[in-house]
Structure formats: structure tokens, C-alpha cells
Amino acid sequence: MLGGGPGTARRVNEGIRSLTAKQRPEHEDRVDIAVELILRPVRTAKNDAVPYVRPRRAVLQRAYRLPEIKELPADALLEGALDSGRSLEELRDAALKEVAEGFGAGGRLGVAQTELAVKATYYMVTASTMALQTEGSGAARAQESRSAVGVLRAMLSQRRGVIQAYEVVRAGRLGRPLLEVDEDGAPICTDDGKYRELTDALVRHTYNGEALAEAVVGLPAARARWATVTKSVHNLRQAMSAMESVPVYEGGDSLVKREGWDPPEIEKPRRYLDRISRTLADWADRYHEQYDEQGQGAEADALDVGEL
């Protein structure tokens, strides 16, 4: 994806031609292959989980159609490279300099901005809560591709966006949640005093000017509701731990572990939890029924690509 230049493109094209009937591979073909290689560790860690991998594959394929990527010079210094590579902080500072010089403002991103965009995109897409996502297929694919590209270009064209991208890469490499940050890189807190996790809606609203309106239909609305569900489960776990921590007396054992709790009071929440568990299992079954066939085809394609 970075710093390969025409030589790399030619070598990849030769590989495609040697394994397929396609004699004139396009840039999109090379992007799709790169994405499969990028996702290989993720697929392994997730045991080839189609529900996890499939949407992330689609978003990376669309986001990495950013035209500046294929225009990067082959001799560009890469952050983290073994031979005279720059540090992540140096990459951030170089991108900030490009912002100050006007790169990306209504035009193309600079070299450092582009490299930072590629690396931040990976973590925004592979995070458990996707901070960059698109939807749609078929006729909508080209429009969705432009949408993802537009968001990235708008983000890396601003000082705050560069700082945000830097913090995304730094947090992602440490396995930490991706937090929204201000101009100085400080995490932003919500009204209840908690750090605000970076979301697709926040990214698009902050950097691309899209309205931060609550979706009411389709995948965006469903994702928002699912975030509420998972947060509620987390809150329930915390509440259970808090109750379990109440001692019989100061310094004593847990009251509920020692004496239990009134069964009639427990019965009602248990019925609700059982119903919720069955509902979630039903949703998972329906998803697998709908996407198993598509997923098997996608995984077969991935195996073919892996031969490169």
C-alpha cells in the first residue's frame, strides 16, 4: 500500500496474470489483494469469523481507493521502516507541516498525510467499535467508496484530524480504545465524565461536515442501538460486581455470596435474561443463514488471493 511505486504494481500484476485469466489487472484489483493480506492476522485471530471480517474487508477496500495512495513515490520514507524510517511522532509532525502548507485543502493530501491516513484507517476499521464504516453494495459501491475517501481526505486536511489520526494509531498499537481527542490530543469527556470513544458518526460530523443526526432506519440505526445493548450488558456486569462487593460487615465476606438473595426477587430478572439470551441466539442464527453462502464465497476468494 505504501511506497511500492510502479515496480511493485508491475510485480503484483504479473502475479495476478499468472494465477487468473485477468490480463489487465487494475488498481482496484491490487487494493483488494493488499486488503486480504492486511486482514490475514485479523482473520486468524477471529478464527475466520465472517460477521467480523466481511464488513471490515468492504470498508478497507473502499477507503484504500484513496487516489493519493497509488501516487506515493517509491522512495518515500516510511514510519517504522528498518532503514532510516521516521518515528510515529515525526510522521505526525510531517503531516502537520503539510496541513500548514495547504495540502489536502480542497486538493490532494501530501505524502505524510497519506501514510498517516492509511495507518489510522486500519485501526479505525478493525476496532471493535468501527470508527470508519460504510454500507451498501452493487450500484451503491462507487458512491460509498467516494464517501470513505472524502472522509479520510477531510480528516487529514485539518490539524485536529492529523492529531486524531496519530492518537488512533498510537492507541491501536497498544490495544487501547480509540478515543476522540481535541486539537491538543487530549481525550474529550462526555457529560457523565467518561472518555468519548471515537465513532463513525463523530468522525464524519467533525471532519466531513455530515450532520450528527440520529439514524432511525437501516444499519446505522441498528449499530447505534447495538452499542446501547452492549453498554447495558457492561453496566449490568458492573452492577453485579458492585452488589457482590457489599460485605456482611466491614471487612467481612460478601453478603450475597454468604447469605444469597431472595429467590422471588431473582426470578423476574432471570426470566428477562433468559429471554434476551434466546433472542440474541436467534439473531445470530438468522445472520448466519443469510450470510453463510456469501461468506464461503468470500473466504474462497481470499484463499485464492493468498496464493499470491
Image (cartoon, grey):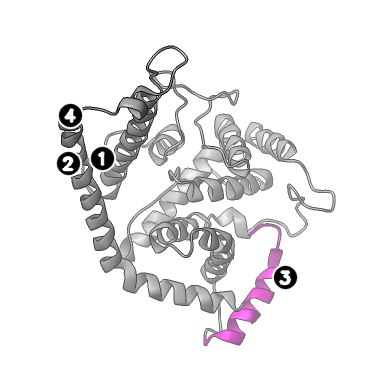
As measured in the structure, the alpha-carbon distance from the residue carrying label 4 to the one carrying label 3 is 70 Å
Percent x, y for residue 296? 39, 74
What residue is pinned by disc 1?
Answer: 215
Verify CB contact (< 8 Å) between mark 2 and mark 3: no
- Around disc 1, counting alpha carbons within 10 Å, would you say few (fewer than 14), some (14 to 19), or many (20 or more)? some
- 175 relative to 7 in the view: left or right: left
Residue most extreme to the right = 84
In this rendered view, identify the residue nearer to me: 82 or 64: 82
Q: In the rendered image, which quarter is residue 41 located in?
A: bottom right
Residue type, label 1: Ala
* Label 2 sits on residue: 271
Q: Give the range drawn in magenta.
A: 1-21
Residue mark closest to the camera, 2 vs 1? 2
Disc number at residue 265?
4
Residue 52 in the image: state x and y as whole percent: 42, 57
Between the residue at mark 2 and the residue at mark 3, the CA separation in whole angstroms equals 63 Å
Q: What element carries label 2?
A: helix
Looking at marks 2 and 3 on the same chain, the residue that comes earlier in the sequence is marked by 3
Q: Is residue 81 left or right of residue 263?
A: right
Please give the name of the residue rendered at 61% of the width and 56% of the height, measured from the top-left corner: 69
Q: Which amino acid does label 3 sit on?
A: Gly
